[in-house]
Amino acid sequence: MMSQESVDIQQTLHHRVLIAALIIFTQDLSSGGGAQAWTYNYSIGPNRRWLQARQWCQEHFTDMVTIQSQEETDFINNLLPFNPKYYWIGVRRVDGAWISVMTNETVPEDAQNWAPDEPDGLVGQDCVEIYLKREIEVGMWNNEKCSKRKGTVCYSASCTQDSCSAHAECVETIGNHTCQCHPGFHGPRCEEAIACKPLLDPEQGSHQCFCPYGCNRFNSSCSFHCELGFRLVGVPQLLCQTSGHWNHRVPLCQVEQCPVLNHTNSSGGRMNCSHPIADYSYNSTCEVRCDEGYELSGDGHIRCDHTGQWTASVPACTVKKCAPIFSPVTGNMTCVYTVEPFIFGSWCDFTCQEGYYLSGNSTLTCLASGQWSKPTPKCAVVQCNSLEAPPHASMQCQGPLGEYSYDSICTVQCEEGFELIGTNKTKCSSQGNWSHALPLCQAKRCIPQNPPSHGSISCSDPNGSFRFGSRCTSACDEGFLLDGTSSTECTSLGTWNADIPRCPARTCSTLNSPTNGSLSCSHPHGEFRFGSRCTSACEEGFLLNGTADTECTSVGTWNADTALCTAKRCPSLNPPSHGSLSCSGPHGEFRFASQCTSSCEEGFVLNGTSSAECTSVGTWNADIPRCPATRCPTLNSPTNGSLSCSHPHGEFRFGSRCTSACEEGFLLNGMADTECTSVGTWNADTPLCTAKTCPALNPPSHGSLSCSDPHGEFRFGSQCTSDCEEGFLLNGTTDTECTSLGTWNTEQPHCLARPCPLLAEAPQHGRMNCSHPHSLFSYDSHCDFGCTEGFWLRGTPTVTCNSSGHWSRDLPTCELVQCEVIRALSLPLSVNCSHPLGNFSFGSQCLFTCKGRFSLNGTELLLCSPTGFWSDGLPNCTEDLPVGAAMLMYTGITATSVLVPLALIGLAALILTQFKRKGNRARSDFIVGNMRWVQERVHSRGKEALHTVGLHISVSPWAFSPDTAFSPSVVQNPALGFLNLSPPGFGAFQLGSVPGWSPSTGRKEKAEKCSEGL
């Protein structure tokens, strides 16, 4: 059976192997290089809070895993073991949003994989766990409190600065990474720009290129230019695009074209042209010659220049001209010509503007001599006959060309008091006639007047009935008075200078209705005027005193005085008991409409109607009320207290007094005494009896506090229980209670980190570095170990104090590095060694010498280095020999060289045998010591010896740590065989030859293999 110590070591190695198994990697052993990949790491020993888990990931790897796809969810679910606490992921709620720690941005809703009814809105549940290896809701999310402890899943980014070129983005994938090329680049690392087809110079042109990534490659730009006299047709600058094509076709150089000249337009002459390149293009020339009778205007020889323009305008052959003539003033001229004005053969017709007539010939012709046939004619103005002003009017005439001439205007204006009949203006037309006949002036008419009512009117009319200058006088009939001006006159404006007066009847004094009565009147000639009649009447509750009817006489007085109305009387009233009476009598004491109001003394309430009124029948409309004492609300004893009262005016009425008191353990909150006031309210609220308060308690550091509060938080009767987190011990009493005195009956305990055994000092020849987050050598303390030069660490390099108060691993030791033992040598070679620390260990020195006629071949002094290797291979002694002896020696060396590989093979078999016999604890120690010895043998002897027989040995350096797996180390020869050395837990230890080849005979046969599982 396997010992308990071996079982513990096997479980530890198994846990490490599980962590290593999550590392997804690829490596090309034949090329010695490879591509890194995105790797995952997890830890469930111990489970951690969310923040601790993230700190652990950032300290040892890149960060926490943030699930980005269903593929990643399935991958992790397949690899990670089941953890009852499940695993944290790198998603956390910040300000109401779920934020990814990888991008520090909100996780899109379609990427959130919540379990049903999640996330919930409970306070403090801001961190996210993922369900793995679960029967239901596998890979789904749940929000939890960040203080809970769960498994940790980390990732290590595979992208480095050298993974891709500067023209790409490195994209992490599961088990690999890819380079996403920027547009215009391709290749495994996107280092090569895409190429476009090479460009050629256009005819009669050239081009120049700027190539940032190589000629004719992406982003290369080429500018095209043409020779003098040629212009570029197309885009002048081309750019190599991401598609590998130029963005435009190569432009052409086309000769500059001048405007085509029309030979037929040269009237009176002819034009001859020559075209050395193309018609009417660069360097074309043209010459113009005129016919007889025409003269040349301009340069007769022109050329098309490099800008596509003629050096001068095309010259013309012009015909001879007559002197220019102009149209007469206030006239028009119309000319007819073949080519241009005033040339031979042209003629001009003359006309005058409206209001003018022509004086002279109407047509002139340009003769062959260059003279006009007649003098230029003139235009004269048209005249109208003279005018006289009409009666009672004045006239004024004016015109731009003279009085009574064309466009003259005459204006007629009537005298004051007369109005114009007709048009006030007339104008002289172009035919010499006036546009309108002269108007008339007639006197203005006023509105006809009628005599006033009860009066008469008499008028005088010098200019017609009721016209300008008429005067009218008004008079009233007997018994009526004139109201207004008696005379009025029709003015020059056609209005009367005064209104016609009125004749109203005589007025009596205005009568008012008697007090508390009414007045009814009839007015045939106006209100309160002659003939008006009025009748008086009293309101309900009043009696008439005097004559009811009166009339306004012809002399403007009333024939009787207005009557009076007196109020009816009610019985006298007395005030109520405990009250008072206040009366108001608008018509006298206790008379009709008198009002009496009753009121009670302070502390008494009116019972009945407060007001009474004397009615129109002489009786009161209500009885006198009573005044009972005011009542306050009924009081009850306070909770956890008592109430005592006195009632001088009845229970809980005005004057009642009550006193409150509290039970033991409670304090009175408010006034103890209260009194019923006169307004029916208590002068103070009933107090409360509140439990006494104890000092507030906080949970102990690294612990929790749960309380029951029957009378309120931290009050009399409250009971609190303290508890500590995992890894901490309670120091003090668990429970405490708030007493009636407002104090806790025990002090609050503390949570102290659980201590681990004290580590007094580092191992011999080693060093120790410890961190203590809570206290010295207690829960969560970490200690890192290392050895001084020349010593190697046996055991784990790091130990942690766990929650049970034990160190996570046994303490390591520092063992002295051993070099190969140099055994007794055969003469003539001798050696003398010194060992300051131990036999054939770090620091040992060996001095070699040769005796007799032999000389030393190799290094005289060998040192045992800190890596466990001698500073050089063993030397040998050589002697100068004849040629024949040398040949014999060579034959011996060859035989020896064949034996060395066989010796190495036997040594490997010995290692396997010893390794199998030892326990699991000795595996790593044995492998390190023996593999170093094998490497030394290969480097110092075997490599040269095996080369002699054609065997090639390749040894990769060891990368060994007790907590991590070995890197593979191979001794191989493609033609002969291989030696594959794998670390514990990862495969087989094999030694043999390539199948089908035997090094001893050279025949194809099946090679022997030795395979032992480690």
Image: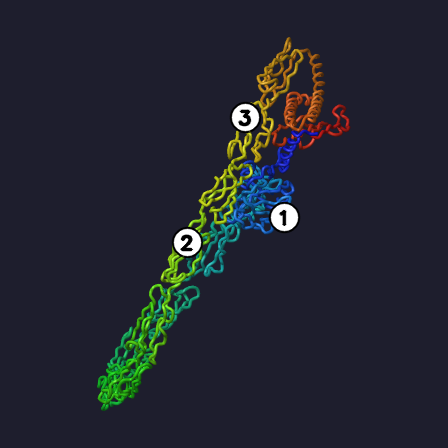
- The answer to which of marks 3 and 1 sits earlier in the sequence is 1
Relative height, residue 146 to residue 321 (above, below): above
- Callout 1: SS: loop
- Callout 2: SS: strand
Q: Position of residue 876 (x, y in %)?
A: 64, 15
The reply to whether callout 1 and callout 2 are in contact (CB within 8 Å) is no
Amino acid at dot 3 = Ala
- Of residues 892 and 47, the one nearer the viewer is 47
Q: CA distance from mark 2 to mark 3?
A: 74 Å
Mark 2, residue position: 660
The image quarter containing residue 319 is: bottom left
Mark nearest the camera among 2 and 3 is: 2
Q: Position of residue 911 (x, y in %)?
A: 69, 24
| Left or right side of 470 for 703 | right
Q: Position of residue 132 (x, y in %)?
A: 63, 44
Relative height, residue 188 to residue 879 (above, below): below
Location of the N terminus (image quadrant): top right
Location of the C terminus (image quadrant): top right
- The answer to which of marks 2 and 3 sits earlier in the sequence is 2
Mark nearest the camera among 3 and 1 is: 3
Mark 3, residue position: 762
Mark 1, residue position: 137
